[in-house]
Amino acid sequence: MKPVRVIICGSKGRMGQALITSVKANPELQLVGEIDAGDDLSQVIDRCDVIVDFSFREATGKIAKLAAEHKKALVIGTTGHSDAEKNAVVETVKTIPCVWTSNFSTGVNTLFWITGKVASIVGPQWEIEIVETHHTAKKDAPSGTAKSLQQVIRQAIGKEAPAHALRIGDVVGDHTVTFGTSGERIELSHRASSRETFARGALRAAKWAVTQKPGLYDMQDVLGLK
């Protein structure tokens, strides 16, 4: 079986470097392009089967448009988009398989699933709050993962859960959901210690995406949690 050919967008960033290292270590994948600010994706896009975008939110729309024009699968890992930006990308990728999620960690996606189950059990009578911690260079707050947790809770019980953001040192990513009521509480936590966790998940999504029909997917689809 031929390896899946991958282009990494945002190749010089922290996640980009982790992705490149992971691709090179995986015999099922082949790195055919490294794209960063100032590079022209259109010059190399025909070499690939899938594009993995961890650049920045302002670039996602252009990358999605090129992927759709060239019928290439797309994995999006950028966060912090406005509703208008999200809607534009969703419209653009209708003709290709696209995996777009706020967090590619298997553990975090398990946290999403468990959070929805716990919220459904305790119901809106319990108080629920989210705390997330990341490194000081992270621009968006609260994190995309925290927003996804809010969405999971809202879908489960129709209740809003506040999210609090901390920016401290070089923390890769910590998320805790606390459910509380009189006399007891439940805490669900996930802590990431390495960016390779997210890189491996994104590349798992990339291999999965090239076998799918056109549509918008998330990591829950990749992991079979839906």
Image (tube, rainbow, N blue to C red):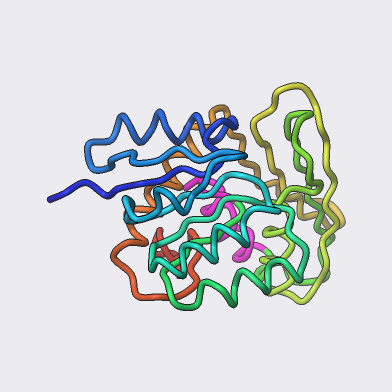
157 to 52, vertically: above or below: below
> Would you say the magenta stretch is mainly helix, strand or loop?
helix
The stretch drawn in magenta includes residue 222? no
Residue visible at 61% across and 54% down?
A: 102
Foreground pick, 38 / 219: 38
Query: 70 or 123, which is in the foreground?
Result: 70
Q: Position of residue 40 (x, y in %)?
A: 52, 46
Residue found farthest to the left = 1
| Number of numbered tags placed on the structure image | 0
Task: Describe residue 25's horizontal placement relative to residue 19 as left or right.
Answer: left
Where does the image place residue 141, in percent across and percent down from the top left? 81, 46
* Residue displayed at 42% across by 71% down: 96
Judge whether 37 appears above or below 86 on screen. above
What percent of the width, then of the height, locates residue 166?
Answer: 83, 36
Outermost top residue: 169
Residue depicted at x 57% and y 27%: 193
Q: From which residue to which does the magenta span run?
A: 103-118
Task: Looking at the picture, tell me which residue is in the foreground, 96 or 148.
Answer: 96
Q: Is residue 64 left or right of residue 5?
A: right
User: Quick one: quadrant of the C terminus?
Assistant: bottom left
Does the magenta segment cover residue 117? yes
Q: Quadrant of residue 69?
A: bottom left
Question: Viewed as shown, does residue 201 lie left or right of 92?
Answer: left
Residue 151: % across, % down = 71, 66
